[in-house]
Amino acid sequence: MEDHKIIVENSTVPVGTSRKIASIIEEKLSKRVLIHTFDVVSNPEFLRQGSALYDFTHPDRIVMGSDHLETSQIMKSIYSPLKLNDISFVITNPETA
């Protein structure tokens, strides 16, 4: 890492996974005596087998768990090419997502 990064985990995982990922990254940076900022975002997917592409391009909602509003706004901008203007974004903390 050379500058601020956003790490996104998007599978349905146990509560606390985002914090565990952050802890591992912080430990590795500390061992290398590096200080870099980063955010870990939980962005679970709701995809069904056989219709994953359709489910991704036509979601009924997009859930994001982040501790920082700015990071959530960046994540929303990532979805902008899909033209999901009428889709609701549910923004929570990582544990709730």
Image (cartoon, rainbow, N blue to C red):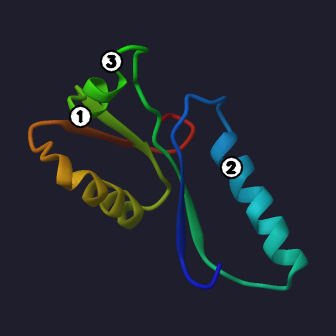
Q: Which residue is mark 1?
A: 57
Label 2: few (<14), some (14–19) or many (≥20) C-alpha neighbours in 10 Å: some
Of badges 2 and 3, the one in the foreground is 3
Q: Amino acid at mark 3?
A: Ser
Q: Quick one: label 1, few (<14), some, or many (20+) residues within 10 Å?
A: few
**On screen, residue 68 above or below 33:** above
Mark in front: 1 vs 2 = 1
Element at label 1: helix
- Tell me the amino acid under the disc marked 2: Arg
- Residue at numbered disc 2: 19
Quadrant in the rendering for residue 13: top right
Residue at the image point whose x is 90% and y is 76% from the top? 31
How far apart are the two marked residues, 2 and 3, measured between alpha carbons? 31 Å
Q: Are marks 1 and 2 in contact (CB under 8 Å)?
A: no
Where residue 21 appears, as percent x and y from the top left, is: 71, 52
N-term-proximal mark, 3 vs 1: 3
Numbered mark located on residue 81 in the image = none
Q: Quadrant of residue 1?
A: bottom right
Instruction: Report the front residue among 93 and 73.
Output: 73
Q: Is residue 90 left or right of residue 36?
A: left
34 to the left or right of 46: right
Residue occupying the point 15% across, 42% down = 84
Which of the marked residues, 1 or 2, is nearer the chain's N terminus?
2
Locate residue 29 relative to residue 8 in the image: left or right: right
Name the one closer to the observer, 93 or 40.
Answer: 40
Pointer 3 residue:
51
User: Does residue 36 sit above or below 9 in this rendering?
Assistant: below
Question: Whole-Å distance between the Cαs marked 1 and 2?
Answer: 28 Å
The answer to whether residue 48 is left or right of residue 60 is right
Residue flagged by tag 1: what amino acid is it? Thr
Q: Residue at x 79, y 75 (%)?
A: 29
Secondary structure beneath dot 2 equals helix
